[in-house]
Image (cartoon, rainbow, N blue to C red):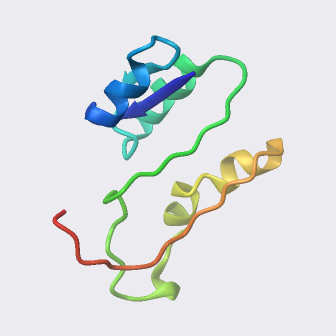
């Protein structure tokens, strides 16, 4: 198994301590980081990406979302290959980020 994140956390260190889980340092907000993680995962991929803080603000509301924005949830790219992408986009949330 493999897990990826921009920075290793104590929780990830605990997961990788028995060497059954491999850590990949990858910025999943960057397509190159996602490609790196997918390449390391090999032929079978079961991935959950929880990428807090990578969404751009959309003050114009739902109708301001572009095709590029929609493709960033991966649905149009991987959907035709039978991969379902589910996202929850609650909108702006006050965080330390």
Considering every residue shown, the one lying at the far left of the view is 96
Compared across the picture, whether 25 is left or right of 40 comes to: left
Compared across the picture, whether 70 is left or right of 11 comes to: right
In the displayed structure, 5 sits above or below 72; it is above
User: Where, by quadrant of the figure, is residue 59 drawn?
Assistant: bottom left
Q: 10 or 31, which is in the foreground?
A: 10
User: Where, by quadrant of the figure, is residue 24 drawn?
Assistant: top left
Residue located at (38% from left, 16% from top) = 17
Where residue 55 appears, as percent x and y from the top left, is 37, 63
In the displayed structure, 27 sits above or below 70; it is above
Quick one: quadrant of the N terminus? top right
Where residue 80 appears, as percent x and y from the top left, is 81, 48
Where residue 84 appears, as percent x and y from the top left, is 74, 52
Q: 16 or 64, which is in the foreground?
A: 16
Where residue 68 appears, as percent x and y from the top left, is 51, 61
Residue located at (76% from left, 46% from top) = 83
Q: 74 or 86, which is in the foreground?
A: 86
Quick one: quadrant of the C terminus? bottom left
């Amino acid at each position: 198994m493999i897990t990826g994140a921009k920075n290793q956390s104590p929780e990830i260190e605990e997961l990788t301590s028995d060497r059954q889980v491999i850590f990949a340092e990858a910025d999943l907000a960057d397509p190159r980081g996602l490609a790196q993680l997918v390449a390391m995962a090999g032929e079978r991929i079961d991935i959950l990406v929880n990428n807090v803080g990578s969404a751009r603000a959309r003050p114009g509301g739902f109708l301001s979302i572009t095709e590029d924005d929609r493709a960033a949830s991966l649905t149009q790219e991987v959907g035709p290959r039978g991969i379902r992408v589910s996202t929850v986009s609650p909108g702006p949330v006050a965080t330390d980020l």
